C-alpha cells in the first residue's frame, strides 16, 4: 500500500491496492477517511463489495479489456461504511511488481478536489514566477501587459518598464517584426503559432535558442482579451541538434579524396564557423617522412620540442589573418604548450587564454601574443590526430568571435570530428605512400632513356593515372636488334598498384630476353603468353587469390628493318597502332588482334608492311584513347587520335605533347604509355650483299670482297678482324649449313657481318681440347667482336657479328 511523506499528506489521498483476483491488499488512512473502514476491516475482502451499484456491462468491442489497460480513470459510485453513497473520482494504475505479479493501485482525492477562489491567483503567480518559462501577455494592440520573471530577465527590463510597449519597441530586429506578424495572425485566426530563434537577448550574457508559442487568450464567454507568448529555452536541444548535423556533415564532406592535405582542409571547412572561429591542422614532420608510427620520444620525450607542419587552416575572417604560419611551414611547439600536452597525453585539452599554460606557451612568441591580443582569442582546444594506434598530428580549435568559451560538449564534438578526419587522413597517407612506391617502382622499371640506334627516331611519354584509379602496369621499350634492326614494344598489365608494377617489370624483362634471341613477333607473344599463364598458376599455388586473378596483359610488338624498310608487327589484345605517312595521311593498321596474354591456347598472327622513309609509327596503351569520363568508346578515341596525329609539328616531342594535350585535357583515368617512332632507311651504299658458292675455295673470294668494301667505306683498320670473321662464318656455313649461302656487310654505327644459309642447325661456341683440329673459330669470333649471335629466318638462319668502329671527331660515323 502506498503512503504519503507525512501523516497529514497520507490522509488527503485515498490509496487502495487490489490484486488480480479483485481482493483488497492495501488500505491507507485516506481510504479510511473516505469510506469509513479501518484497514483490518477491508483488507482481504473483495473490492466489488465497496461499489454502490453493480459493475457496468462488459466493455464495448472498440474498448480493450480493463486488464489490458495501463491506466484507467473515471467516477465510481462507492458505499460508505455507514451506508450512504459516495461519488469519487478514481485514477487506477495497472502495475507490475519486481517478482512479476500484477495488481492495481487506485487513488482518489479525499479533500481539495473542488476549485478554490485562491486557485486562480495561484496559477497566475506560478506563470509569472516560472524560472524556465518566459511568458508575456499582450493586449489586442500587441502591447505588453504582464510578463513573467524569466521574460523580464531575458529582456533586461522590469514589468513596469515593459508595460505599454510593443515587442518591436523593445527589440527592434527583423525577428521581432516576424513574431508580431505571427501574434497578429494568432489573434485574428485563433490558430496557435510557433517561432524558433537563436540569439542573445539584451538581458542575457550568452546566446539562447528559444521556441516561442503564440496563442490567443479569451475569457469564459469567448471574448478575445489578447495574445500570449510563451518561450521555452531550447538551447541544449538546439546545440545537440547542431552537433548531430555537424557530425553528419563531417561524414559526407571529410575524406572525399585520397589526398592528405585536402582531407585536412575539409575538416577545417566543416568545423568553422559552427564549432570554432579559427582552426589549424598540423602534422608531425615524422609522419610526412613516412614513418609508420610517429609516436614515442618525438611526442613524449621530456624537454624535447615538437615539430609540426601546417597543412590546413580556416577562419571566419577572409584570408585567415589569425594564422601565424603559412601552409607548408614548420613550427616548433614547446612541451608545455597545449598541442604538445594533448599529444603527450593522447587526450584533448581545453584551455582559457588567461590560463598559465597559454601564457607560458606564447611568452617567448611575440607574433602569437600579438594575434591573441589583436583578435581577442579567449579559449583554445587541442585535439590529437590519431588513427590505428599512430599519432599523426594535432588540431587546434580557437574562438574569438564566438562569445562563449569551449565547454565539455564542444570538446566531445571536436574529438568526434577529429577522429573521423584522422581515419581519412591515415587512409590517404597510406594510399599516397603505396602509390608513390608503385610509381617509383614502375618508373624504375621503365627505360630512363631510349637507346641510340639508326633505325628510328623515337619519343615517348608515360602518364600515371589519377589518384583515384591508382598506378597501373603500362610500359614501353625500344630494343636494338641485330642487323641494325630495332624492336618496339608497348604493353599494359591488368590491375593497379604495386603488384601491377611488379608484373609489368617481369613482363618487360621477359620481352627483352625473348627479343635477344631474335624471335619473330608472333612467336615472341606466344612465349610471353605462356609466361603470363605460369604467373597466374604460381599465384593460385601461393593462395594469392585476387592477385592471381589480376595477372593478365595486352601487348604490341613490332620489329623494323631500316635496310628493307619492312616492319613486322603482332599484338595480343592491344589497341591498333597508327601509321602517319610522309604526306600526312593517318591510318590504323588492320593488324590481327590476337587474345590478351594469359588466356593460352590461341595463336598470334603477324603482319609485315613496308614503310616509306619518314613514316611515323604510333604505339600506345588504351588509357590514351579512353576519355577520362569513359563516356565514349575506343573507336571514338582512336578517331580522335588519328586527327591529332595528322597535325604537323616541328619535332616528335612536340607531337607527343600536342597529342596528349588534345586527347587528355586532364589526368587520365588509366595509365598512358605513348611511343612515337619515325622510320629511317639505311642508304643502299652502306649495305653490301654477296651470294657465296658452297665450294670451300669461295671462302678466299669472300674475304677479298669484304676487304674491298671496307676500303671503299674507309674502314681499313677493321680489315684484319673482318677477314677472320668472314672466313670463320662462311666456312661454317659451307661445311655445316645448306645452300644458298649469303654474305652481307652493313655499315651502321657498328660494322655488322652476317652469313645466312638454309640450314636449321645453329652453331655453339665451345673450347677446343688440346688435340682438336676445330672448335676454336667461334671463340675467336667472340673475342674479335662486340657481340655475335644467331637469329632464325623464314628459311634457315643468320649468324651475325658486330664490331665497334670509332666515331669521327665531328660526331659522325665513317
Image (tube, rainbow, N blue to C red):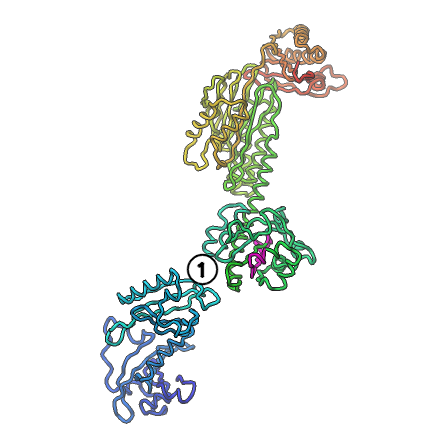
Q: In the rendered image, which quarter contains the N terminus?
A: bottom left
**Quick check: can you spot residue 775?**
no
Q: Mark 1: which secondary structure?
A: helix
Q: Magenta stretch? A: 371-393
Task: Check residue 379 for magenta coloring.
Answer: yes
Estimate the x, y position of residue 361 in percent, counting from the top left.
64, 59
Q: Check the image and name the residue furthest to the bottom.
A: 82
**Quick check: can you spot residue 454?**
yes
Task: Check residue 148 for magenta coloring.
Answer: no
- Which residue is located at x 31 percent, y 77 percent? 72
**What residue did someone put label 1 on?**
242
- Which residue is located at x 54 percent, y 43 percent? 544
- Which residue is located at x 34 percent, y 74 percent? 70
Estimate the x, y position of residue 109 in percent, counting from the top left.
33, 84
Estimate the x, y position of residue 550 in percent, counting from the top left.
51, 38
Left/right of residue 282 with respect to residue 121 in the rendered view: right
Determine which quarter of the picture holds residue 640: top left
Give whichever of 787, 674 is nearer the camera.
674
How crowded is the residue under tag 1: few (<14 C-alpha within 10 Å), some, or many (20+)?
Answer: some
Give whichever of 755, 504 is nearer the camera.
504
Up-down relation of residue 196 to residue 218 (above or below): above
Determine which quarter of the picture holds residue 16: bottom left
Q: In the rendered image, which quarter contains the C terminus?
A: top right
Amino acid at each position: 500500500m502506498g503512503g504519503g511523506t507525512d501523516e497529514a499528506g497520507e490522509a488527503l489521498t485515498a490509496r487502495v491496492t487490489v490484486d488480480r483476483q479483485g481482493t483488497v491488499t492495501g488500505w491507507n488512512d485516506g481510504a479510511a477517511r473516505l469510506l469509513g473502514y479501518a484497514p483490518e476491516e477491508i483488507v482481504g475482502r473483495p473490492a466489488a463489495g465497496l461499489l454502490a451499484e453493480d459493475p457496468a456491462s462488459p466493455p464495448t468491442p472498440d474498448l480493450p479489456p480493463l486488464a489490458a489497460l495501463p491506466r484507467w480513470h473515471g467516477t465510481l459510485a462507492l458505499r460508505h461504511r455507514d451506508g450512504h453513497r459516495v461519488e469519487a473520482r478514481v485514477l487506477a494504475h495497472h502495475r507490475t511488481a519486481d517478482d512479476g505479479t500484477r495488481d492495481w493501485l487506485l487513488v482518489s482525492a479525499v479533500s481539495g478536489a473542488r476549485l478554490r477562489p485562491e486557485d486562480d491567483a495561484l496559477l497566475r503567480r506560478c506563470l509569472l514566477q516560472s524560472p524556465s518559462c518566459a511568458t508575456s501577455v499582450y493586449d489586442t494592440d500587441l502591447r505588453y501587459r504582464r510578463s513573467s520573471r524569466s521574460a523580464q530577465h531575458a529582456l533586461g527590463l522590469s514589468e513596469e518598464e515593459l508595460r505599454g510597449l510593443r515587442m518591436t519597441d523593445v527589440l527592434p530586429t527583423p525577428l521581432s517584426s516576424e513574431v508580431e506578424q505571427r501574434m497578429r495572425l494568432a489573434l485574428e485566426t485563433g490558430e496557435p503559432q510557433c517561432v524558433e530563434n537563436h540569439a542573445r537577448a539584451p538581458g542575457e550574457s550568452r546566446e539562447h535558442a528559444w521556441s516561442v508559442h503564440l496563442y490567443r487568450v479569451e475569457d469564459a464567454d469567448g471574448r478575445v482579451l489578447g495574445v500570449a507568448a510563451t518561450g521555452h529555452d531550447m538551447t541544449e536541444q538546439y546545440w545537440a541538434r547542431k552537433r548531430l548535423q555537424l557530425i553528419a556533415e563531417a561524414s559526407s564532406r571529410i575524406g572525399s579524396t585520397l589526398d592528405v592535405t585536402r582531407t585536412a582542409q575539409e575538416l577545417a571547412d566543416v568545423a568553422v564557423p559552427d564549432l570554432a572561429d579559427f582552426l589549424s591542422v598540423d602534422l608531425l614532420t615524422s609522419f610526412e617522412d613516412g614513418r609508420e608510427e610517429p609516436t614515442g620520444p618525438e611526442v613524449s620525450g621530456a624537454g624535447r620540442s615538437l615539430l609540426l607542419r601546417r597543412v590546413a587552416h580556416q577562419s571566419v575572417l577572409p584570408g585567415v589573418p589569425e594564422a601565424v604560419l603559412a601552409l607548408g611551414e614548420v613550427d616548433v611547439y614547446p612541451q608545455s604548450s597545449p598541442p604538445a600536452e594533448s599529444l603527450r597525453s593522447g587526450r584533448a585539452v581545453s584551455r582559457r587564454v588567461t590560463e598559465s599554460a597559454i601564457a607560458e606557451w606564447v611568452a617567448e612568441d611575440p607574433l602569437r601574443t600579438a594575434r591573441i591580443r589583436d583578435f581577442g582569442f579567449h579559449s583554445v582546444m587541442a585535439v590529437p590526430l590519431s588513427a590505428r594506434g599512430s599519432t599523426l598530428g594535432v588540431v587546434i580549435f580557437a574562438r574569438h568571435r564566438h562569445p562563449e568559451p569551449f565547454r565539455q560538449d564542444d570538446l566531445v564534438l571536436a574529438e568526434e570530428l577529429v577522429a573521423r578526419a584522422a581515419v581519412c587522413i591515415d587512409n590517404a597517407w597510406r594510399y599516397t605512400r603505396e602509390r608513390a612506391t608503385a610509381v617509383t617502382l614502375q618508373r624504375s622499371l621503365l627505360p630512363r632513356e631510349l637507346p641510340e640506334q639508326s633505325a628510328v627516331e623515337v619519343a615517348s611519354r608515360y602518364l600515371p593515372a589519377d589518384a583515384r584509379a591508382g598506378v597501373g602496369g603500362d610500359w614501353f621499350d625500344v630494343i636494338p636488334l641485330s642487323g641494325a634492326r630495332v624492336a618496339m614494344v608497348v604493353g599494359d598489365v591488368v590491375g593497379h598498384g604495386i603488384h601491377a608494377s611488379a608484373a609489368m617489370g617481369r613482363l618487360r624483362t621477359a620481352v627483352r630476353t625473348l627479343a635477344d634471341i631474335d624471335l619473330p613477333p608472333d612467336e615472341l607473344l606466344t612465349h610471353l603468353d605462356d609466361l603470363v599463364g605460369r604467373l597466374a598458376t604460381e599465384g593460385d599455388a601461393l593462395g594469392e587469390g585476387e592477385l592471381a586473378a589480376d595477372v593478365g596483359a595486352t601487348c604490341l610488338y613490332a620489329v623494323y628493318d631500316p635496310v628493307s624498310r619492312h616492319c613486322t608487327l603482332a599484338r595480343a589484345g592491344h589497341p591498333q597502332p597508327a601509321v602517319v605517312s610522309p604526306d600526312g595521311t593517318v591510318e590504323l593498321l588492320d593488324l590481327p588482334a590476337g587474345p590478351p596474354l594469359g588466356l593460352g591456347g590461341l595463336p598470334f598472327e603477324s603482319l609485315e608492311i613496308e614503310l616509306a622513309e619518314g613514316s611515323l609509327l604510333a604505339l600506345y596503351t588504351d588509357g590514351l584513347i579512353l576519355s577520362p569520363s569513359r563516356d565514349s568508346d575506343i573507336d571514338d578515341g582512336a578517331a580522335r587520335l588519328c586527327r591529332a596525329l595528322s597535325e604537323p609539328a616541328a619535332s616528335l616531342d612536340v607531337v607527343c605533347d600536342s597529342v596528349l594535350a588534345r586527347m587528355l585535357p586532364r589526368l587520365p583515368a588509366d595509365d598512358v604509355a605513348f611511343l612515337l617512332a619515325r622510320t629511317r632507311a639505311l642508304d643502299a651504299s652502306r649495305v653490301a650483299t654477296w651470294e657465296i658458292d658452297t665450294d670451300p675455295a669461295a671462302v678466299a673470294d669472300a674475304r677479298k670482297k669484304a676487304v674491298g668494301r671496307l676500303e671503299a667505306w674507309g674502314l681499313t683498320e677493321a680489315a684484319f678482324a673482318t677477314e677472320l670473321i668472314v672466313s670463320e662464318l662462311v666456312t661454317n656455313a659451307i661445311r655445316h649449313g645448306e645452300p644458298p649461302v649469303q654474305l652481307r656487310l652493313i655499315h651502321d654505327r657498328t660494322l655488322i657481318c652476317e652469313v645466312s644459309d638454309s640450314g636449321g642447325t645453329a652453331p655453339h661456341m665451345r673450347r677446343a681440347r688440346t688435340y682438336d683440329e676445330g672448335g676454336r673459330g667461334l671463340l675467336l669470333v667472340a673475342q674479335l667482336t662486340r657481340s655475335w649471335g644467331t637469329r632464325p629466318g623464314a628459311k634457315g638462319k643468320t649468324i651475325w657479328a658486330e664490331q665497334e668502329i670509332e666515331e669521327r671527331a665531328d660526331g659522325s660515323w665513317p
